[in-house]
Amino acid sequence: MKKFLLLTALLATSLTGAAQENNLNDIVSEYRLDNGMRFLMVQRPGAPMISAGWVAHVGSANERPGITGISHLFEHMMFKGTHTIGVKDAALDDRLRAELDSLRQQMFALERINRLKVRTGQAESMSDPSLDSDEMKALRAQFETVIKQQRANIIKDQFDQIYTEQGSTGMNAFTNEDMTVYFLRVPKNKLELWFWMESDRLSDPVFREFYSERDVVYEERRMRTESTPTGVQNEVFNSMFWRGHPYGWPVVGWPSDVSAITREQAENYFDIYYAPNNLTAVLVGDFDEDQALRWANQYFGQIPRGKQVPPDVVTLFMPLKGDFEYHAEVDAPPSVTLSFHTTAFGGVDDPALMVLADALNGKTGRLHKRLVLKDQIATSASASEDSRKYDGVFELSASGKSDVDPRVLKQVLLEEIEKIQHDGISEYELEKVRNNLSADNFRRLEDNFFLAIQLLYYDGLRDWSSMQTLFERVKSVSREDVQRVAKKYLVTDNMGARLYTRKAGAEAEDPAMADFSDQQKQTARQMLSQLKSQPAEKQKEILGRLESMRSQAPAEMQAVIDYVIGKIGQ
């Protein structure tokens, strides 16, 4: 996405004018229903598909030890249907769910005893065979029998099928530390269907397949964390860096928590965080705004406001008071990541930190020039600024060549930071970043689907209007601002470092990924791991879907898709 300075300057000059004509405050209409639910509507005449979605202002940061991973679990559960969707016999489904709850409570009582045995050293883990009593085996057998009866009564993926049969595409969702977002594209003549479907799953949730879906989430954790070269190590480091803070546990949750969450806990969590007063919906496309507002009141307005206000996240980051290093051997090339605590989204230094990251990044950025081109000790190097709802982190990363000591990578990264702390960045670098961000600002307004996702995302962080104000603040960043934040945050007593060395006998990295960023490499490895675990026929189906979506993916993702298709096709 990076451009040469002259080309970008010309592009930004023409595009920024267009972006200013479509200032977000001029094109977004905001409405609030009586129950507190907010609607953001953007008119785009002529678009045959409407980009629609909603954000629940809840993520893993709103959890607590014991139920970590529950926000992500909800992302799965919200596609399981309602009393009228996804089931053949609703009354039978109610009875089977109650029976599963009862059996699970009996199993949990036995697990309480087993946890004590693990804690007191009488067993290695909760999966220790010695803990599997005859009573637990009998309960598990009964449980599996009821699960099979429940599955036989389910109409699999009916929620998705209804949308697809009516021409909708791209239905999906994501969960992170701060929010859970649901979205799709729906034909403009089927907009009322979206209002009915989405309000139905919010007003009539059943949490069908709750216990079996926990196993799916656990498997997702295994594939994305435990089966990747550095997933477990990154998780350990993260818990150390964010000590005591809710960002310290993974979005997917701790395994022992995920396996113990009950449907009753899920219902209580839903009542608090999925109440309409904690939701914001977005529509972008060609629709009648007055009619859409009537449907909003008709379908969503009948959902009662939550009885309990979502509690505040009160835990603040505890200063590191000194740097620390986390060393580990991994099945991957040597690498280093330096993490510095910064500020939450909307902080006074957010814009300057964004500019600093952009000046360091890319093929023309300082890190690539120094570590990859000049010193030739790394295959990739990058910087990232990640300001979240409740706190932030700035990271420098480098993936080294096979014989490089990660301590050398760390030293060179720190040297590049010291240069900026001493001399700042050049006017050329600052102008390049501004031009890139100007072009990005136009692109996010131009595409309906991307605009909808961005509105949902920024509203999940703070408020949708911050999307516009952040861009305005970035334009006012000076060279002095960048130098100041480098001095303020990128200091060793505010730093945690991950230093990974290649494990003896580990498989060498595929040369075909030499030009990939660290994020691309991780994504490619995860996709390959997941694909290889599937039967051959399932692999073909997934590859077909990847090929169909390739043209709509960003360039960096297209390269990953091409790589994965090539590897599986060998």
Image (cartoon, rainbow, N blue to C red):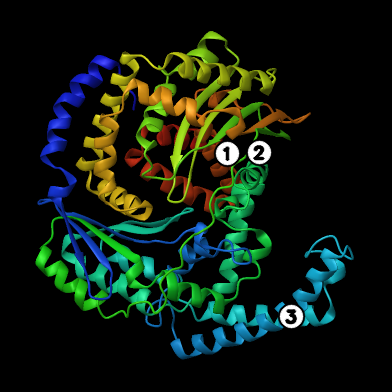
Q: In the rendered image, which quarter is residue 354 located in?
A: top left
Report the front residue among 478 and 502: 478
Disc 1: CA contacts within 10 A as few (<14), some (14-19) or many (>=20): some
Relative to 445, residue 76 above or below: below
In the visual, does 108 lie left or right of 374? right
Disc 3: CA contacts within 10 A as few (<14), some (14-19) or many (>=20): few
Tell me which label, 1 or 3, sits earlier in the chain.
3
Residue found at x 56% / y 43%:
526
Position in image of residue 43 (x %, y %): 13, 54
Say which element carries label 1: helix
Q: Nearer the viewer, mark 2 or mark 1?
A: 2
Say which element carries label 3: helix
In the visual, does 142 lie left or right of 352? right
Q: Is residue 72 visible?
A: yes
**Does the residue at mark 2 contact the one at mark 1 (Cβ under 8 Å)?**
yes
Look at mark 1 in the image and give the residue it sits on. Answer: 525
Tell me which label, 3 or 2, sits earlier in the chain.
3
Residue found at x 44% / y 29%:
485
Residue found at x 57% / y 52%:
245
> Which numbered dot is residue 229?
2
Q: CA distance from mark 1 to mark 3?
A: 39 Å
Q: Amino acid at mark 3?
A: Ala
Report the front residue among 91 and 264: 264
Look at mark 3 in the image and give the residue it sits on. Answer: 109
Q: Amino acid at mark 2?
A: Pro
Image quarter (top left, top right, bottom left or bottom right) of the N terminus: top left
Tell me which label, 2 or 1, sits earlier in the chain.
2
